[in-house]
Image: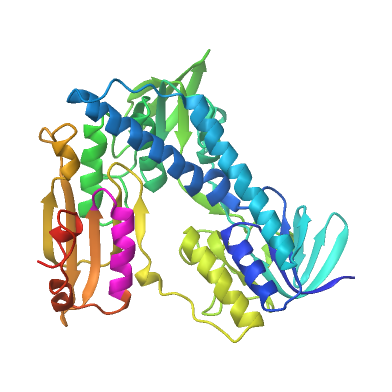
Amino acid sequence: MDQFDSIVVGGGSGGLAFAQEAAALGARVMLIEHNHLGGTCVNRGCVPKKIMWTAGKLVRDAAAAQGVGILEAPLLHFTKLAERRDDHITGLREEFAENLDQAGVTLLRGTASIDGRSVTVDGETYQATNVIVATGARPTKLEIPGSEYLRDSQDVLSWTHLPKSMAITGGGYIGCEFAAIFAALGAEVTLIHDGETVLDMFPEDIARHVQTQLIDAGITLYLNAELTSVTADGQCLTFTTSHDETGTAEKIVSAVGRTPNTDTLGPLSDVLECADNGAVKVDDRLGTNVVGVYAIGDAANRMPLTPVATSDGTVLARMLHGEGGELISLNDVATTTFVYPPAAFVGSVDKANLQGTLRPLSENVLTAADGKEPAMYRIGFDSAQRLSGAQIVADHAEDLIGLLASLKRAGATRSALERVIPIHPSTAEEFIGI
């Protein structure tokens, strides 16, 4: 029976980071993956989504330029876009496999069954000092009449043809991103959400701002409503909401959340302690209630974000096979939803010491805002005037929020920011160096 220092089950962002770091530290490591390397993020998550989002932004900007007569009408070739998206993903998968091979990690393809520190794949059993559960999560199934007609995020990000119309149920960041992206690409979009505002997990000011932007983009919103049934008539799907609203669409997408893959681990699934959301409870060393078993990524009850999974995988490898490490503080992790423009936040802004709206310079070249919601920002400081949090809805918010997260972690003060001379003209000068 083969013995390994660590066996990691799952080849997503967390599993790959752990395997490569542990191997670099001299450990004998096996990584088991039953599907494509890269996990959700690379294959049917943030990577293909960002490619689609970028294409949508190009279409939006071109349409705006056409509106002021400086560019001809854009013509989207969705099939070509899908080919470029899929080619990029294939290249990443190949790169991951090569990196594991060069690092000396044993890659095993198959479905793992875990019993303590014994892992069985296709009838062969392997032993490890440490077993790391990095099995990710899957789209949550919505059980309603006609659910067989629903598509999920994995389907959407593999489409090779653009639907003329689509309805999305679920107004979290995935649902809002899909709504914004496909509306930008030319689809007629309806978004159904069971709350008063979309983006329940975001600060209220951001959520309401994004909601207005979605409406401005021509997206139909059904709020405080749930999708209750779907029927099919040929190629046309008809949906009904809990308020007896009805509509039709070529595609209907369920984006009501994700379920951690902690129920597919064999005997281990029966003994792991999990939180209400199905993710494994972990301690400050990512250990579970089972000795020698650890959990990272979406399978762990921390924050289901790719950068967190990557960081936790690297740190756990150093804890088990190096000289130790410290987990990142989740309070310092920035979050972004890729709508138009992106909406991002970090930390808390109980009271906005600095806040305002701004008009991007691009509107002097493209079309004017015409009364639509401008970009916005809110910056907060604590009683010691240290940066406590930031909220931004603006072009490049995904980049700005990362820098502000670093400043927050470093304890930057308001006076320090006021002594910075930002680039002029830029978005940053609106709230830095005033």
Image position, residue 237 (x, y; %): 47, 20
Residue at the extreme right? 1
Image position, residue 282 (x, y; %): 55, 73
Residue at the extreme bottom? 323
User: Where is the C terminus found, in terms of image quarters?
Assistant: bottom left
Q: Is residue 159 left or right of residue 68?
A: right
Occupied quadrant, residue 53: top left
**Closer to us: 429 or 391:** 429
Q: Is residue 27 visible?
A: yes
Image position, residue 56 (x, y; %): 37, 34
Is residue 134 magenta-colored?
no
Residue drawn at x 52%, y 64% is 309
Tell me if residue 194 comes above or below residue 328 in the rendering.
Answer: above
Q: Is residue 249 left or right of residue 73?
A: right
Q: Main secondary structure of the magenta part?
A: helix
**Closer to us: 334 or 119:** 334
Applied colour scheme: rainbow
Image position, residue 197 (x, y; %): 26, 45
**Closer to us: 425 or 219:** 425
Residue drawn at x 49%, y 21% is 231
Occupied quadrant, residue 58: top left
Q: Is residue 220 visible?
A: no
Q: Tell me the magenta residue range.
A: 393-408
Tell me if residue 47 comes above or below residue 114 in the rendering.
Answer: above
Residue drawn at x 73%, y 77% is 27
Is residue 400 magenta-colored?
yes
Q: Is residue 383 left or right of residue 99?
A: left
